[in-house]
């Protein structure tokens, strides 16, 4: 259950506006204009959608003949974490940009829809506003649920619900999300203002600590809060200030960056102040000191740490999937507790699901992907797992930056040791290399450490334990190649920060030892890793410590700018070649880059003579952007990928496009290209070097 779109803005009494899933979006992009589609076309689209949701997802599900049940957004968030908490009682606080519509919550369809109305009210239940205005649209803003458990049985009750009015037409982009009055939506509005992306909240979080270096300081620039109050009683938002903010979406202009830094600091401070007071009130009203956090706001690590430090709170649990990906887990857990017809065995709590839930890729899968890039990479294969670990540790100790592809991928937004870019944190210069050259992102953004849990206290001021998840299955193992997706045990979940959900100060004496993972405020968003949770990654850290003297690595997600975290071996190899990594380590294979065209393995020059053969086998389309006078501003080539999507390469001139066009119909020698295109030989050779680097052509010099 994600955000709903109402294409025609029509909501009949008791029913929400019709919504389309994401896979219809490309075909229905004009649905906000009722004149674009006829009633017949709209009816056909509705029938197609109905068919898509009524079709079984798999033969296994079809055999079950199970009914479909829709779970309200915030309630599904709550179910994604409550069953895993080893405590007799607690609270789940759900905060995001927006949740379910009030219209959906008020409907009832014979059990096919489950919302908060199905739950009993806690004796201290409070709703804000107490009465919703007729003919006014509302969305969930913040919700708190109290829970109690009896064995594996979990009982939720409604403790608090705040609704936000839909202050602008829901037909607008993203449903007018940035005009809503939730703490998550206001924070996202600042992300949009600075970076032009409502989902860039992580950038705002990383930018805020840099305000300490501003002159005048941040408080002088924004002395008054944007958000204030206690969510339980009232949340005050200074819309006049928000509407008057200058420099919209202009991060590219350096003169604006002090302003943006101060703005990020202001909203981060407000978020921490408002939510901390809200959590204090929730704990006081419920009498439960165990707090679980879910929803996108729970990705804000400084906020999570601030909550953990509150005297009113004993424990904080943030699952590895607090955002909308966790909705899938919540729906499954609701079904397990309410829809099955067997009694679960009595246990204190279910084991917390492993974050390593992705698909397993075999050695054969990796080899198949390597073959696609064989003209661009060197491969050392048939290594044992210990041998690849040794190579990885040696490369890291030498200061190389590697891609790490190990077992099943992470479920959730953080790289936790299965799809990671790893580096030695000893040199601060590696931050610039990774941010600028590899990930191609802003330089202010911090990079995180991963540390073996048994030595974490040597490097980080950990404070109290964080998680309170139930006991794991005996002998549960980490995400080794071919292994079943594991459960995390109690020791892992009670670690200080197993899912990179909290920040901690770096021990002062160690900041000069691992400077690449120390943020400007002296903290780090750390991951503490036990052997049980990820044996192979833990072994790499241990081996690296034997060489370097410290069991800490820089760990950031395996992706380049604008791309999601890699999932497949092919995606890993593509990111490796596009991002400037030194190597990729697979389970039994080490992949490095071939020398650039025109050089040998030692960096020496290799002549490209007129008989060198040039080939291209990739289907492409080109796009040229020109100014009013016809001059070329940007020339791009797009090529499809086998797994879907496209690669985009910006060409350096029309000469490169002419080379591609000439070679597409058949191979050409360098001499033939010079003659056919009328370009100088030096121009042809330099263009070929760039096209080869971007894997648009293959050049055979032998």
Image: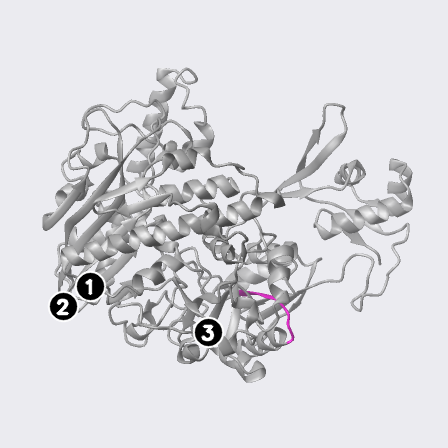
SS for callout 3: strand
Residue 402 among magenta residues: yes
Q: Nearer the viewer, mark 3 or mark 1?
A: 1
**Circle 1 is placed at which residue position?**
289
- Give the residue displayed 80% in from the left and 48% down from the top: 688
- Give the residue displayed 63% in from the left and 60% down from the top: 432
The numbered mark, 3 or 1, whose residue comes first in the sequence reads 1
Using the image, tell me which numbered label, if any, was put on residue 163.
none
Q: Pinpoint residue 3: horizontal percent, then vertical percent.
A: 34, 38
Q: Which residues are magenta?
A: 398-404
**Circle 2 is placed at which residue position?**
346
Q: Nearer the viewer, mark 2 or mark 3?
A: 3
Quarter of image, res 138: top left
Q: Is residue 394 left or right of residue 267?
A: right
- In the rendered image, the quadrant that contains the N terminus is top left
The Cα atoms of the two marked residues, 3 and 1, are separated by: 28 Å
The Cα atoms of the two marked residues, 2 and 1, are separated by: 24 Å
404 or 235: nearer the viewer: 235
Quarter of image, res 467: bottom left
SS for callout 2: loop
The numbered mark, 2 or 1, whose residue comes first in the sequence reads 1
The Cα atoms of the two marked residues, 2 and 3, are separated by: 35 Å
Q: Pinpoint residue 572: horizontal percent, then vertical percent.
A: 56, 58
Are circles 2 and 3 on residues that touch, CB within 8 Å?
A: no
Using the image, tell me which numbered label, if any, was put on residue 451.
3
Are circles 2 and 1 on residues that touch, CB within 8 Å?
A: no
Q: Is residue 348 visible?
A: yes
SS for callout 1: loop
Q: Nearer the viewer, mark 2 or mark 1?
A: 1
């Amino acid at each position: 259950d994600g955000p709903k779109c109402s294409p025609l803005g029509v909501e009949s009494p008791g029913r929400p506006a019709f919504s389309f899933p994401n896979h219809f979006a490309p075909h229905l992009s004009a649905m906000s204009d009722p004149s674009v589609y006829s009633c017949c076309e709209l009816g056909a689209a509705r029938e197609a959608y109905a068919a898509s949701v009524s079709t079984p997802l798999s033969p296994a599900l079809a055999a079950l003949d199970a009914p479909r049940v829709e779970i309200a957004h915030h309630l599904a968030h709550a179910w994604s974490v409550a069953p895993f908490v080893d405590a007799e009682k607690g609270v789940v606080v759900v905060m995001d940009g927006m949740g379910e519509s009030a219209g959906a919550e008020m409907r009832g369809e014979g059990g096919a829809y489950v919302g908060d109305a199905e739950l009993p009210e806690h004796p201290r239940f409070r709703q804000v506003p107490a009465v919703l205005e007729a003919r006014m649209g509302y969305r969930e803003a913040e919700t708190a649920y109290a829970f109690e458990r009896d064995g594996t049985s979990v009982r939720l009750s409604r403790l608090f619900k705040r609704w936000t009015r839909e202050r602008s037409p829901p037909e607008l982009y993203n449903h007018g999300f940035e005009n809503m009055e939730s703490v998550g939506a206001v924070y996202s509005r600042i992300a949009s203002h600075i970076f032009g992306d409502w989902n860039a909240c992580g950038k705002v979080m990383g930018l805020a600590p840099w305000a300490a270096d501003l002159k005048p300081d941040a408080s002088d620039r924004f002395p008054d809060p944007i958000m204030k109050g206690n969510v339980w009683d009232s949340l005050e938002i200074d819309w006049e200030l928000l509407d008057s903010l200058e420099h919209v979406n202009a991060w590219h202009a350096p003169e604006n960056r002090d302003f943006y830094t101060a703005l990020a600091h202001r909203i981060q401070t407000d978020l921490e102040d408002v939510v901390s007071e809200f959590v204090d009130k929730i704990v006081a009203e419920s009498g439960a000191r165990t707090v679980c956090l879910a929803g996108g706001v729970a990705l804000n690590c400084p906020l999570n740490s601030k909550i953990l430090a509150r005297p009113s709170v004993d424990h904080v649990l943030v699952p590895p999937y607090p955002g909308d990906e966790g909705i899938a887990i919540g729906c499954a857990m609701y079904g397990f507790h309410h829809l099955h017809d067997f009694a679960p065995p009595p246990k204190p709590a279910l084991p917390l699901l492993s974050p390593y839930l992705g698909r397993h890729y075999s050695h054969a899968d990796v080899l198949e992907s390597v073959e696609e890039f064989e003209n661009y990479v060197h491969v050392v294969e048939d290594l044992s797992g210990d041998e690849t670990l040794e190579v990885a540790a040696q490369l890291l100790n030498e200061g190389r930056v590697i891609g790490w592809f190990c077992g099943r991928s992470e479920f959730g937004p953080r790289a936790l040791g299965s799809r990671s870019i790893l580096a030695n944190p000893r040199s601060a210069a590696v931050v610039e290399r990774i941010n600028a050259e590899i990930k191609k992102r802003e330089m202010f953004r911090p990079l995180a450490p991963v540390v073996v849990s048994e030595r974490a206290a040597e490097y980080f001021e950990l404070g109290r334990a964080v998680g309170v998840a139930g006991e794991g299955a005996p002998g549960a193992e980490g995400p080794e190649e071919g292994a079943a997706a594991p459960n995390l045990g109690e020791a892992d979940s009670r670690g200080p920060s197993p899912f990179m959900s909290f920040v901690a100060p770096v021990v002062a004496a160690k900041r000069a030892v691992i400077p690449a993972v120390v943020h400007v405020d002296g903290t780090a968003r750390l991951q503490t890793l036990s052997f049980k949770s990820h044996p192979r990654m833990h072994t790499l850290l241990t081996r690296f410590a034997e060489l370097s003297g410290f069991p800490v690595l820089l760990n950031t997600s395996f992706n380049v700018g604008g791309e999601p975290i890699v999932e497949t071996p092919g995606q890993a190899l593509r990111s490796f070649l596009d991002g400037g990594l030194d190597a990729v380590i697979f389970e039994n294979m080490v992949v490095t880059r071939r020398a650039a065209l025109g050089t040998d393995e030692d960096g020496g020059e290799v002549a490209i003579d007129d008989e060198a053969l040039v080939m291209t086998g990739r289907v492409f389309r080109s796009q040229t952007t020109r100014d009013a006078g016809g001059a070329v501003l940007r020339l791009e080539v797009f090529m499809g990928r086998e797994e879907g999507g496209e690669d985009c390469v910006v060409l350096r001139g029309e000469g490169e496009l002419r080379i591609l066009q000439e070679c597409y119909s058949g191979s050409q020698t360098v001499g033939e290209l010079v003659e056919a295109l009328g370009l100088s030989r030096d121009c042809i050779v330099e263009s070929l070097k760039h096209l080869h680097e971007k894997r648009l052509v293959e050049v055979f010099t032998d």
